[in-house]
Image (cartoon, rainbow, N blue to C red):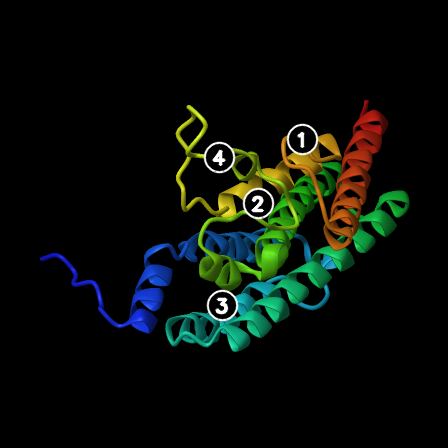
Amino acid sequence: MAQKTPKDPAQKAEHAERARQEPRWPPAVALLAVGGLYFALPESLTYGPNWLLLALVLLLMGPMLFTQRRATPRWNRLLGFLVSGLVTAGMVLSLFLLVRALPRHELPPVLLLRSAAALWGTNILVFALWYWRLDAGGPHARNLRGRHTQGDFLFPQMTINPEQSMLRVDPDWGPGFVDYLFLAFNTSTAFSPTDVPVLSRWAKVLMMVQSTISFTTVALLAARAVNIL
């Protein structure tokens, strides 16, 4: 049965916002993956038990889902910042412990390489979450604007006029979490943006931090590999 379109202007705006609202399960899966990667680390590279971060993520996902369902973006945004800050702090602390453990030979080579690879993957997911949550005011603000024409990152779709271009571009296009995941992956592998220029200062700072973490992790992998050979 087709859903009736509301006649009231305010209801129409709310109906349109819900119709173009991006799914929230991809960032939720990313958060769970971060908790799982943290759980895979040895406890010598974590602050407290290695299951603690995953438990905190699961604990906060309930209120985040509730505030998102009840359309309370302010609280949803605050909870999002809280959980993103927690996983970022956990990653940075584990990286510090990993750097400290390398010259002390506290970990066997296989465990050290596995931990560095887990932190490299965590770095991608954590910064993808930050980009998704901060760009153009966050997902809620992007939904309210409709088509994404202004933001802190210049996606290729933003430069195409769907009425004048022969390319198929959704007139209501907006970036989703996968777009920010692709941006974070490129930053960690190429140490720079590729097809998405960076416009704002905060985004440039975050990308420099992400590139530094990725370079440090890759350097640790390379140094340990050379040492093993």
* Spatial separation of the CA atoms under disc 2 and disc 3: 22 Å
> What residue occupies the far front of the structure in this picture?
164
Q: Are marks 1 and 3 in contact (CB under 8 Å)?
A: no
Q: Residues within 10 Å of mark 1 (few under 14, many from 20)?
A: few
Depth check: give the residue in front, 212 or 155: 155
The residue identified by callout 4 is 161
- Describe the element under mark 1 as helix, strand or loop: loop
Q: Is residue 21 visible?
A: yes
Q: Earlier in the sequence, mark 4 or mark 2?
A: 4
The residue identified by callout 2 is 180
Q: Quadrant of the C terminus?
A: top right
Q: Earlier in the sequence, mark 2 or mark 3?
A: 3
- x, y percent for residue 225: 79, 28
Q: Earlier in the sequence, mark 1 or mark 2?
A: 2
When the figure is inspected, residue 213 is found, relative to residue 15, above or below; the finding is: above
In this rendering, which labeled residue sits more in front, label 4 or label 2? Answer: 4
Which residue type does callout 1 highlight?
Thr
* Spatial separation of the CA atoms under disc 1 and disc 3: 34 Å
Depth check: give the residue in front, 224 or 1: 1
Q: Earlier in the sequence, mark 4 or mark 1?
A: 4
Q: Residue at x 60, y 49 (%)?
A: 128
| 157 displayed left or right of 171 | right
In this rendering, which labeled residue sits more in front, label 4 or label 1? Answer: 4
Q: Earlier in the sequence, mark 4 or mark 3?
A: 3
The residue identified by callout 1 is 194
- Residue 163 circle label: none
Which residue type does callout 4 highlight?
Asn
- Residue 58 circle label: 3
